[in-house]
Image (cartoon, grey):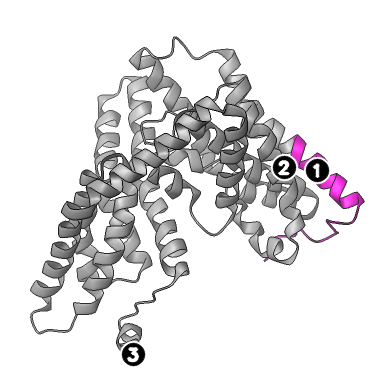
């Protein structure tokens, strides 16, 4: 069996499923649901029906996009990869609010089983897609609804707890999601899987921004403008090799997130209500997707009559939570740690 799995390139590991597949799922979400939401929102604001239609097309294909991305990360053969479109659509549709989580589990199983039978028969063109689709669609009918219900309930629990305890949950959500952003896993996929929106989504945005902007600013001395851009609007994950060498460099942005999280929830009541369902909550300043998500949520709330208008106080809150406070706080904490020798010269230099 070990030799068979090796020949089929099936690696049962936390890295393959928890990092590679999850990260790929986030990319699939970004290239469909998230970008579709952005285009659709722009179309609505500019009164361009063409953009609204284009955005909706991309939005509707989020399930297949996620499944194909997962299959690609699992190195699925072409016949398996193409068959995952039906698997992704069925899992996402039947999974409801927890569609992304259902797609993650079901697409992984369908892809791996599809890989097992791929090129094993003389009628591969029939067997491989039939097995992949049957397994994926069958699992979608059986387990996607309960997975979706469980994910929705858990996400709702986090959101309700944040509403009831905005200070403490603001800290918890901001710190945990921010840490997930910097780790080699996908914070965007996690937020999307549990539909992390509302105040909890706002705290998640705060935590992600604290990590990205924090590392970008506190390492400016070592990495200059290239590092500022690559980390500030790219990803703080670039610092992971340095964190492994000296975990103390993670303290400043994490402390910053513990401060900006409750400020976001208690002072500015920053909410992430983008129609994309929470994926932007875990993006931070990456391509300014988090900020675009907050803005599109404001627009959506105004259109629904939930929010009267977008106010200067809203914009001030976004600027402080997403950019100014993370930069100032992370720099301050970093300088304190430099003075006591916990962060040394060269600890924040990005690997070449």
The image shows residue 110 at horizontal and vertical percentages of 24, 65
Is 38 in front, or is 103?
A: 103
Q: Nearer the viewer, mark 1 or mark 2?
A: 2
The image shows residue 180 at horizontal and vertical percentages of 55, 51
**Residue at 56%, 28% in the rendered image:** 165
Q: Choose the circle earlier in sequence order: 3 or 2.
A: 3
Is 69 in front, or is 247?
A: 247
* Quadrant of the drawing holding the N terminus: bottom left
Task: Let me know if residue 220 is in the magenta part.
Answer: no
Helix, strand or loop under label 2: helix
Q: Choose the circle earlier in sequence order: 1 or 3.
A: 3
Q: Which residues are magenta?
A: 328-352
Characterize the local packing of mark 3: few (<14), some (14-19) or many (20 or more) Cα atoms within 10 angstroms: few
**Residue at 35%, 34% in the rendered image:** 37
Is 212 in front, or is 339?
A: 339
The image shows residue 61 at horizontal and vertical percentages of 25, 45
Q: Quadrant of residue 98?
A: top left
Separation of marks 1 and 3 at Cα, in angstroms: 51 Å
**Residue at 55%, 45% in the rendered image:** 177
Residue 255, numbered label: 2
Task: Residue under label 3, please give it.
Answer: 3
Separation of marks 3 and 2 at Cα, in angstroms: 47 Å
Outermost residue toward the bottom?
3
Separation of marks 1 and 2 at Cα, in angstroms: 8 Å
Task: Residue under label 1, please give it.
Answer: 333
Whether tag 1 and tag 2 are in contact, CB under 8 A, the answer is yes
How many badges with numbers are in the image?
3
The reply to whether residue 345 is visible in this rendering is yes
């Amino acid at each position: 069996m070990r030799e068979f799995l090796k020949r089929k390139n099936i690696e049962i590991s936390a890295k393959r499923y928890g990092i590679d597949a999850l990260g790929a799922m986030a990319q699939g979400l970004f290239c469909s649901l998230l970008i579709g939401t952005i285009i659709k929102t722009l179309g609505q604001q500019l009164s361009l029906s063409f953009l609204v239609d284009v955005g909706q097309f991309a939005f509707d294909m989020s399930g297949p996009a996620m499944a194909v991305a997962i299959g690609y990360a699992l190195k699925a053969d072409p016949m398996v990869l193409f068959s995952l479109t039906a698997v992704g659509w069925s899992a996402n549709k039947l999974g409801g609010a927890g569609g992304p989580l259902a797609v993650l589990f079901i697409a992984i199983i369908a892809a791996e089983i599809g890989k097992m039978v791929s090129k094993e028969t003389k009628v591969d063109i029939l067997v491989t897609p039939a097995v992949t689709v049957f397994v994926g669609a069958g699992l979608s009918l059986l387990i996607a609804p309960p997975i979706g219900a469980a994910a929705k309930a858990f996400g709702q629990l986090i959101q309700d707890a944040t509403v009831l305890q905005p200070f403490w949950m603001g800290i918890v959500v901001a710190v945990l999601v921010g840490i997930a952003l910097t780790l080699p896993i996908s914070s965007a996929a996690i937020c999307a899987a549990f539909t992390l929106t509302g105040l909890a989504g706002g705290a998640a945005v705060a935590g992600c921004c604290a990590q990205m902007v924090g590392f970008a600013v506190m390492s400016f001395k070592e990495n200059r403008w290239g590092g500022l851009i690559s980390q500030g609007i790219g990803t703080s994950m670039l610092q992971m090799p340095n964190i492994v060498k000296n975990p103390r460099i993670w303290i400043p942005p994490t402390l910053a997130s513990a401060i900006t999280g409750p400020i976001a929830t208690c002072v500015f009541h920053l909410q992430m209500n983008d129609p994309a369902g929470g994926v932007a909550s875990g993006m931070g300043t990456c391509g300014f997707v988090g900020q675009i998500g907050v803005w599109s949520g404001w627009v959506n709330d105004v259109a629904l009559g939930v929010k009267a208008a977008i106010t200067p106080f809203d914009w001030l809150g976004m600027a402080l939570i997403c950019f100014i406070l993370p930069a100032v706080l992370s720099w301050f904490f970093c300088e304190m740690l430099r003075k006591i020798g916990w962060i040394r010269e060269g600890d924040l230099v990005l690997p070449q």
